[in-house]
Amino acid sequence: MVPETVKPSSESESNMRLLIIEDDRESADYLVKAFREVGHIADLASDGEEGLALADSGDYDVLVIDRMLPKRDGLSVIGTLRDKGNRTPALILSALGQVDDRIKGLRAGGDDYLPKPYAFAELLARVEVLSRRHGGPAEETSYRVGDLELDRLSHRVTRGGEELTLQPREFRLLEYLMKHAGQVVTRTMLLENVWDYHFDPQTNVIDVHISRLRAKIDKGFDRPLLHTIRGAGYMIRDGIR
């Protein structure tokens, strides 16, 4: 029985349609029952092949996928769906909870990763967040700050119409900063989202790349766009003096 305190968020869509792909019968039955008790629709697949077929043919809001499955593992299921153009958000459940395991799951196409054991309240909250994101606007393919423009599809960066040559890591760094233009971006945010580190390696790698990026996008132009916010992080913004 799911505790009465576990309820869907008022911000989430009601009656989400979920697909649970889980081979452990006890765990699977618990999840299906728990999601249904808070008002959602939950279908069940007991192996990777069945899960892939249902996910490929069904209209689901979120997939909850165990990583270790018979016939086809969870990462293979997600990878095949992504190759087919299926972008349904996928949350991976796994007893493998080390940093490398989580990174591998996310790089395989998973949208979130929750190690076992877990609290259902947290799982529910994560599923609701994925559902809201999936129903939101498509991600931007280009960003502009002042006269600086970045095109994610062509990997082209220009400022004032002049094309700039960036290394792959510099491009990712600039893309992340421009995506959060006008906001303070912390060192931790950059380590996790640009370098895929979930710890601080205690090196000056960020400082070095910021310095190189600043030289490429600001040097020779009338006003700087990339700013260091002392004690907080970095910000890219037009109009700061």
Image (tube, rainbow, N blue to C red):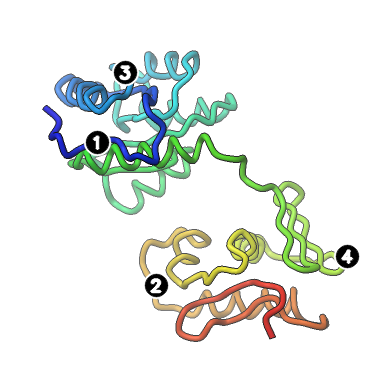
Residue drawn 29% across the image and 30% down it: 68
Counting from the top left corner in percent of width and height, residue 83 is at 57, 28
Which label belongs to residue 7? 1
Q: CA distance from mark 4 to mark 3?
A: 53 Å
Going from the N terminus, do you reach mark 4 or mark 2 first? 4
Near mark 1 (Cα within 10 A), the count class, few <14, some 14-19 or many ≥20, is some
Q: Left or right? Give the position of 2 relative to 235.
A: left
Judging by the rendered image, the residue that carries numbered circle 3 is 47
Q: Residues within 10 Å of mark 4 (few under 14, many from 20)?
A: few
- Of the two numbered discs 3 and 1 on the same chain, state the one appearing first in sequence: 1
The nearer-to-camera label among 3 and 1 is 1
| Dot 1 amino acid type | Lys
Which residue corresponds to mark 2? Answer: 201
Q: Position of residue 195 (x, y in %)?
A: 50, 62
Q: Nearer the viewer, mark 4 or mark 3?
A: 4
**Residue 92 as seen in the image, left or right of residue 154:** left
Residue at disc 2, secondary structure: loop
Mark 2: amino acid: Pro
Which of discs 4 and 1 lies nearer the camera? The answer is 1
What separation in Å lies between label 4 and label 2 (alpha carbons)? 37 Å
Q: For the residue labelled by badge 1, is the local secondary structure a helix, a strand or a loop?
A: loop
Going from N to C along the chain, the mark reached first, 2 or 3, is: 3
